[in-house]
Image (cartoon, rainbow, N blue to C red):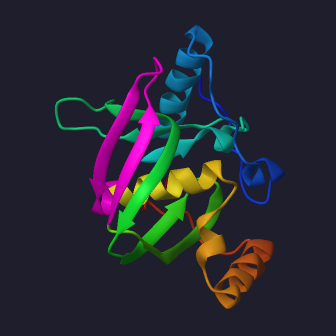
Amino acid sequence: MAIRTIITYPHPVLRQKAEKITVFDQELKTLIEDMADTMYKAPGVGLAANQIGIARQLVVIDRSTEDNERKFLTLINPEITGGEGSVVDEEGCLSVIECYAKVKRFRKIHVTAQDADGNPLEFDAEERFARIIQHEVDHLLGTLFIDRLSSLKRALYKKKLKKKIGRASCRERV
Ligand code: NI
């Protein structure tokens, strides 16, 4: 178990396209456990490997329940192969400090990926779960949610970041 450092904007690793994972070994499993530890410590509800400085196609997503507070989904080499509908809702990111904004996403998506052992996964996701997956897959492509805002809103954020105004918030981040 190890908590890794979360990299924040504007670090260049967040802009790197993550590489496909082809080896499913113990080292990968350790990395997955570290990512889950890091996500829960933050706390966040999703984390992509780029966010801890590793540009590989791996994300973890919180799926905790009342009975299991450390239940999470691991997606390796995830791809969104279909999307329908659209929803605008607020997003925040562990790598983009002091910023929450409304982002438009598909309401429902179809996802293909692999699990920690390399087995194929294929499923549909909706609403909040679908939003988190879309946010994380964006990370693997080097895209941040602020890239999806209008240029005016993005400029305002950069200005705010320079002045370091704003306060910590308990809103959900991914
Ligand atoms: Ni994020």
Is residue 3 shown left or right of residue 154? left
Q: Is residue 81 visible?
A: yes
Left-right relation of 96 to 83: right
Q: Quadrant of ligand 1?
A: bottom right
Location of residue 108 by image quarter: bottom left
The residue under the point 82% across, 52% down is 12
Residue 110 magenta-highlighted: yes
Q: Is residue 159 above or below residue 17?
A: below
Q: What is the x, y in percent for residue 77? A: 55, 37
Q: In the depicted view, which residue is nearer to us: 105 or 51?
A: 105
Residue placed farthest to the bottom in the image? Answer: 152
Principal secondary structure, stretch drawn in magenta: strand
Farthest residue to the top: give it: 26
Estimate the x, y position of residue 48 in percent, counting from the top left: 57, 43
The total of numbered circles placed on residues is: 0
Q: Quadrant of residue 119?
A: top left
Q: Is residue 152 above or below residue 43?
A: below
Q: Quadrant of the N terminus?
A: top right
Looking at the image, which residue is at 66% across and 53% down?
141
Q: In the orientation shown, which residue stands out farthest toward the left?
A: 67
Percent x, y for residue 16?
77, 49
Q: Is residue 89 left or right of residue 96?
A: left
Q: Is residue 161 left or right of residue 22?
A: right
Residue 82 belongs to magenta span: no
Q: Looking at the picture, does residue 172 appear above or below residue 85?
A: above
Residue name at image x 57 percent, y 11 percent: 25
Q: Residue at x 56, y 16 (%)?
A: 24
Task: Depth check: give the residue in front, 91 or 41.
Answer: 91
Query: Is residue 6 visible in this depiction of the protein?
Result: no
Q: Which residues are magenta?
A: 108-129
